[in-house]
Each structure stands twice: as structure tokens, then as C-alpha cells.
Amino acid sequence: MAPPSKNGGWSTSRAPERDAALSETTYRDWFRHFKDGDFDVDDHPREGKPETFEDAELEALLDKDPYQTQQELSSALGVIRQTISKRMHALRMI
């Protein structure tokens, strides 16, 4: 990790990766599991229908109307807006 700049902050080109850090909620959940003796780190099925769609579906909607909002896309695909945002980032669309 790069040393801080003279003003005490991190330079933008050498800032620590923030995406790699755990959120406080995730940290608390894992801490609670470990404290209770649950050391299983595998994902477990969750209740409800998983939010799934094919990237091709998202791309087809955007080809039809590239000015749709993420909220409009999420309604059309039956997922939450954050799912659309994550897929668009992964596909380097935004």
C-alpha cells in the first residue's frame, strides 16, 4: 500500500481499494456466525425466488431503448435496481 500524501490523505491514484473492504453489516454477520461456532463459509440457499436474468435480455431492452432508467429496466426484468446497476458495471455499460 502506498504511503499517505503530505496532507495526510491518500492520493487518488494510490487510494486503497474500497470495493475489497467488507461492509459493516457483512462484518457483523460473519462475526456473529463465527462467535456462535458456525465456521461454514459456503453460501446457503435463501428464501424467495432468486433474481436472475440473462445479460442478453438486458442488452435487448437497451437496444430497443437506450434511454431507459435502471428502475424501468429492473421493472421489466423483475429484479431490483441494484441488480441492474451491478450487471451494467460488470458489462462495462456504465
Image: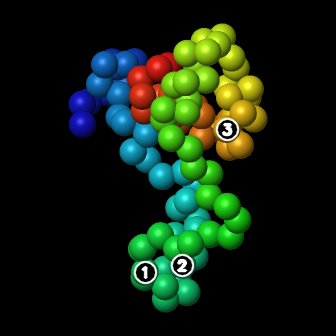
Residue of label 1: 40
Q: Is tag 3's residue or tag 1's residue first in the polypeptide sequence?
A: 1
| Rendered view: 79 above or below 84 | below
Q: Which secondary structure, mark 1?
A: loop
Specify whether 89 is left or right of 73.
left
| Residue type for callout 2 | His
User: Can you say whether 57 is above or below 69 in the image?
Assistant: below
| Residue 16: percent from left, percent from top | 35, 34
Residue at which label 2 appears: 33
Instruction: Tell which residue pokes out farthest to the left in this image.
Output: 2
The kind of residue tagged 1 is: Asp
Q: Position of residue 45 (x, y in %)?
A: 56, 72
Nearest the eye: 4 or 54: 54
Q: Are marks 2 and 1 in contact (CB under 8 Å)?
A: yes
What element does badge 3 sit on?
A: helix
Note whether 33 is above or below 19 in the view shown: below
Q: Residues within 10 Å of mark 3 (few under 14, many from 20)?
A: some
- Extreme residue in the bottom direction: 37
Identify the residue shown where x is 52% and y is 82%.
35
Give how far across and how far down residue 40 sits, in percent: 43, 80
Residue 1 at least partly seen: yes
